[in-house]
Image (spheres, rainbow, N blue to C red):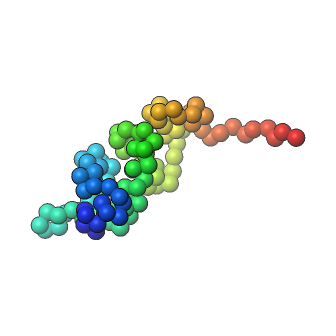
Amino acid sequence: MRIGDVAHRAGVSARALRYYEEQGLLTSERTASGQRTYAESAVEKVQLIQQFFAAGLASRTIAQLLPCVDTGTSSPEVFDLLGQNAPGSPRRWRRWPPRATPSIE
């Protein structure tokens, strides 16, 4: 997909896509004439990046989280990272996995 197509489908500007590339959040291939082309999955990834930004995360933090999204794995360090960098993040993110809570009868 070309940059304009991804931008339109994801609801962002082409400039935002170029910024995401500069920050290491998104990758593209180049045609022989130098035009960017993206995988179909780029639209979904851009939408996720937008959600991370909306949650108040910095691009540096997002860059550290995206590999977890790509692989479907996480670690206590990732939750520490979220706890340290997300504005207003709940303290419970630092205690992952959550502790079992007793049932109330």
**Residue 2 x/y as whole percent:** 25, 66
**Residue 15 x/y as whole percent:** 23, 52
Left or right, residue 15 beside residue 48: left
Q: In the rendered image of this protein, does residue 69 appear above or below residue 30?
A: above
* Residue at the spot 75% in from the left edge and 38% down from the top edge: 101
Quarter of the image with the N terminus is: bottom left
* Residue at the spot 58% in from the left edge and 31% down from the top edge: 91
Q: Name the outermost residue toward the left.
A: 33
- How many badges with numbers are in the image? 0
**Residue 103 x/y as whole percent:** 81, 41
Q: In the rendered image of this protein, does residue 32 appear above or below residue 104?
A: below
Left or right, residue 38 beside residue 41: left
Is residue 56 in view from this perspective?
yes
* Residue at the spot 51% in from the left edge and 32% down from the top edge: 88
Is residue 92 or residue 10 the one in the foreground?
10
Left or right, residue 97 beside residue 88: right
Is residue 5 or residue 45 the one in the foreground?
5
Quadrant in which residue 52 is drawn? top left
Quarter of the image with the C terminus is: top right
* Residue at the spot 62% in from the left edge and 40% down from the top edge: 97
Is residue 77 in view from this perspective?
no
